[in-house]
Image (cartoon, rainbow, N blue to C red):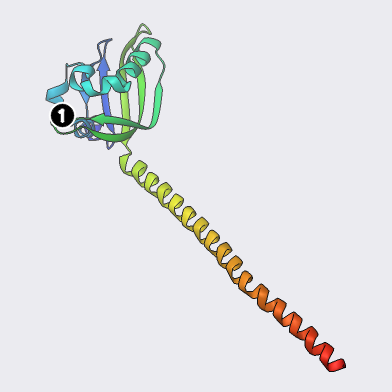
Amino acid sequence: RLFRQAPGFMCITEGASHAYALVNTAYEQLVGQSDSEVIGRNVSEVLPEVADQGYIALLVSVFSQGESFVGRAMPVRLQRNAGAAETYYVDFVHQPIFDEDGGVWGVFTQGSDVTERVLAEAELRSTGHALQEANERKDQFLAVLGHELRNPLAPIHNAAHVLRHLVGDNASA
């Protein structure tokens, strides 16, 4: 029950064919298929769209090398319930499961869907870039405005200087 109710997605695949042995409710929701649709079937059969995305190769590597893999905010396109493929972002760990002889028996996968966080961070970065561009445009505008305001004042300043000299010359005469 603990496995089924865990908030993050979890699954166990067994053997070099990576057949599903267990999946929890969060995994079912992520892939859009129930445990009765996936148990006993290979990952590549259940999720053919992930093969070209490198996820099957990751399972093969973890199984054959016996070393864990940790993925952070990794994009995965999933085609759930015969709908259009959608991109999700996931944090996950593939952990080899060893048998009593020390050989790899299967792979335990657990993780969480971080799509909302990744999209919010992307929007925040985009907003930051937009604010930085607006700030640069403001600075350019103020520089142009300052230049334009100084230009008309220069002839006025020169005329006032000439008039001061003329008035000063006439006053001393």
Q: Residue 66: which quarter of the image?
A: top left
Q: Residue 153: which quarter of the image?
A: bottom right
Q: Residues within 10 Å of mark 1 (few under 14, many from 20)?
A: some
Point 47% across, 53% down: residue: 133
Point 31% across, 21% down: residue: 55
Give percent across and percent down for residue 49: 23, 23
Give percent across and percent down for residue 8: 29, 35
Point 19% across, 34% down: residue: 29
Q: Residue furthest top?
A: 101
Most foreground residue, 153 or 23: 153
Please give left or right for residue 39 compared with residue 141 in the image: left
Q: Residue furthest right?
A: 173
Most foreground residue, 34 or 149: 149
User: At numbered mark 1, what does the secondary structure look like: helix, strand or loop?
Assistant: loop
Query: Residue flagged by tag 1: what amino acid is it?
Result: Gln
Most foreground residue, 89 or 1: 89
Q: State whether residue 138 is above or below residue 57.
A: below
Most foreground residue, 93 or 164: 164
Q: Quadrant of the N terminus?
A: top left
